[in-house]
Image (cartoon, rainbow, N blue to C red):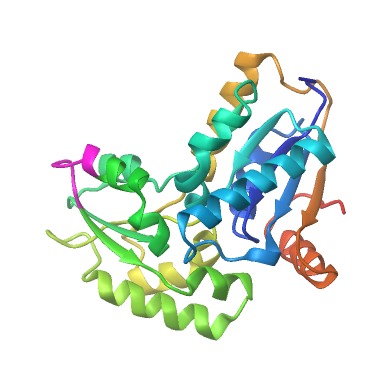
């Protein structure tokens, strides 16, 4: 593999931009290609077989069209459904997935109560069940499937985002720093950081929101260094692509311009 080649990043839509934001901050010399599966978004309420098939197709497209040197699966649902198959298909390529930040949340909570907001598919996956079971006794986890929230964020439907965030945080119970209250909230879908301001207003300033972008960026950097694939250029670029209509690509570009702090290329 070529150290000058780009890193591929994919998600069902705009949610993975939250991971891309962390990747670009941590690895400024790298080129990135972000591919949004807008034609099939969102993944969160799809079955595992469908998501796995789409993940394989997205990886193959990034490999064939852009010659990527590494792949970041910037989607919790796709990571749970497809990482084993992806590693089998591309055993020599550095691959990084995401998972809900239960481990750091268990380490950070002071009350011992952690809320988890995620898609229904993620919460039902065997990968999540194994992660949850591995932390038995370390904290109490309150799990909340958030049907429709990723799609509302994808559509930038502010009214629906506010209503769904209010519904799902209310279902999680009491927030705060008092004994038994949830003081740590895991955002278990890469779309959800883009609703962080709404969520902070609902749960209060004492509650810590846990995202996955920075740990993913650190792991990507470690794998590139171990493989001798770090880029040598002064600064990298970004290419945005979508499986959807031209309008979907325009929407992706608008979201990137809104949410990514660095200049965005086509």
Q: Is residue 23 magenta?
A: no
Q: Say whether residue 138 is magenta.
A: yes
Q: As displayed, is residue 73 above or below residue 155?
A: above
Kindly tell me whether residue 212 is visible in this rendering.
Answer: no
* Residue at screen point 54% across, 57% down: 50
Q: Is residue 154 left or right of residue 197?
A: right
| Horizontal and vertical percent position of residue 208 | 36, 55
Q: Quadrant of residue 187?
A: bottom left
Where residue 172 sits, quadrant-wise, is: bottom left
Residue nearer the viewer, 135 or 200? 135
Q: Main secondary structure of the magenta part?
A: loop
Viewer-closest of 263 and 48: 48
Say left or right for 193 vs 245. Answer: left
Name the spot of residue 183 as percent of width and height, x first: 26, 57
Look at the picture and state if 43 lies above or below 62: below
Which quadrant, please, contains the N terminus? top right
State the extent of the magenta-drawn residues as a range.
133-140
């Amino acid at each position: 593999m070529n150290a000058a080649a780009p890193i591929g990043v994919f998600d069902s839509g705009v949610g993975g931009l939250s991971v891309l934001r962390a990747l670009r901050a941590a690895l400024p010399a790298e080129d990135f290609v972000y591919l949004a599966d807008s034609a099939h978004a969102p993944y969160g309420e799809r079955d595992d077989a469908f998501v796995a098939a789409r993940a394989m197709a997205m990886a193959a497209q990034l490999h064939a069209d852009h010659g990527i040197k590494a792949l970041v699966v910037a989607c919790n649902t796709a990571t749970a459904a497809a990482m084993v198959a992806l590693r089998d298909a591309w055993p020599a390529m550095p691959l990084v997935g995401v998972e809900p930040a239960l481990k750091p949340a268990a380490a950070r909570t002071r009350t011992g109560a952690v809320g988890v907001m995620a898609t229904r598919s993620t919460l039902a996956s065997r990968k999540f069940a194994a992660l949850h079971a591995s932390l038995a006794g370390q904290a109490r986890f309150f799990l909340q499937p958030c049907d429709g929230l990723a799609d509302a964020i994808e559509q930038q439907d502010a009214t629906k985002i506010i209503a769904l965030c209010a519904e799902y945080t209310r279902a999680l119970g009491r927030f705060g720093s008092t004994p038994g209250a949830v003081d740590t909230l895991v955002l278990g879908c890469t779309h959800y950081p883009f609703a962080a301001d709404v969520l902070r207003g609902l749960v209060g300033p004492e509650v810590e929101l846990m995202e996955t972008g920075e740990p993913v960026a650190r792991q990507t950097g470690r794998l590139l260094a171990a493989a001798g694939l770090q880029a040598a250029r002064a600064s990298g670029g970004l290419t945005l692509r979508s499986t959807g209509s031209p309008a979907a690509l325009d929407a992706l570009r608008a979201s990137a311009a809104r949410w990514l702090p660095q200049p965005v290329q086509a």
